[in-house]
Image (cartoon, rainbow, N blue to C red):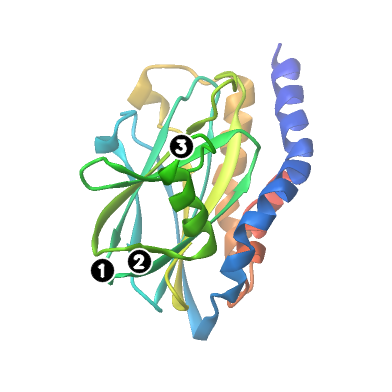
Amino acid sequence: MADDALSSVNSLVSSLNASINNAVEAIKKSQSNQAVGDVKEYSKTVNKSALNTNAGATDIGVISKNTTRLNVASTLAANDKVDFYKFKVVTKGELTMGQVGDDGVHVQLMNRLGRVMADSDPKAGDNYTAFKKLQAGNLTVDKGDYTLRVTRDKGQSDKDPKNYAMQLVMGNYSQDYDTVAKQPAKGDTGLTLSTGQQATLDGLNQAISSMNSIPTGQTGTQKLMGSFSLFV
């Protein structure tokens, strides 16, 4: 049984490289966001909250125009329906979001009131148009608190883990903040992780070492691809 679980994880890992290729085009714009001077790197590994609500959002940092770039890598584990990430914008400007990972990951940008501002669902109308602007670095946002909501696309099985990484930047940057977000600790949920889930989470825990080994001043694509180096 354990062998079957590990085999399932290995199969997911081996196919991730192909799924990443479909997402790379969406983050080419972030290659124009240039490192300024000697970039300072900051990294952390955190456990996501057991609360599947906006109130349990994982804090990934502060966006300051021409100063900071935020990166987060995580997974929607089997039967994990939603992840939330919060960040603060301290200077009004045009925000860019890059994303790589498995197919079937649904991302929404929400303001502090919970209103959806951008949606990766092609059927989301104006919110999808806003999402394309966000990918291209053309979505203007005001100062304030924001949340990223990550789920599966409609039709995707809750049993299938989904790996993903996202990046946020406004203009250029001189400070790079990496967050590896793991599943809640066992004691937070009262549930026992399967062998396959634990293997996936152990890999995410090692991602911090991979991130620290990535040279600074690289493009958005290189950064996000590097965050998946442990899977391929």
Residue at image location 24% in from the left, 37% down from the top: 55
> In the displayed structure, does residue 132 sit left or right of residue 54?
right
Q: For the residues labelled 1 and 3, say whether their Cβ atoms are less than 8 Å apart.
A: no
Q: Secondary structure at mark 1?
A: loop
Residue assigned mark 1: 90
Residue underneath mark 3: 124
Measured as percent of width and height from the top left, residue 89 is found at: 29, 63
Q: Is 232 left or right of 134, judged from the image as shown?
A: right
Q: Which mark is residue 63?
A: 2
What type is the residue that disc 2 sits on? Ile
> How would you rate the neighbour count of disc 1 (Cα within 10 Å): few for under 14, some for 14-19, many for 20 or more?
some
In this picture, is 203 found above or below 174? above
Residue lying furthest bottom: 37
Give the left or right position of residue 152, taking residue 7 as reference. Answer: left
Does the rendering let one see residue 131?
yes
Q: Quadrant of the N terminus?
A: top right
The quadrant holding residue 216 is bottom right
Q: Is residue 167 visible?
A: no
- Mark closer to the chain start, 1 or 3: 1
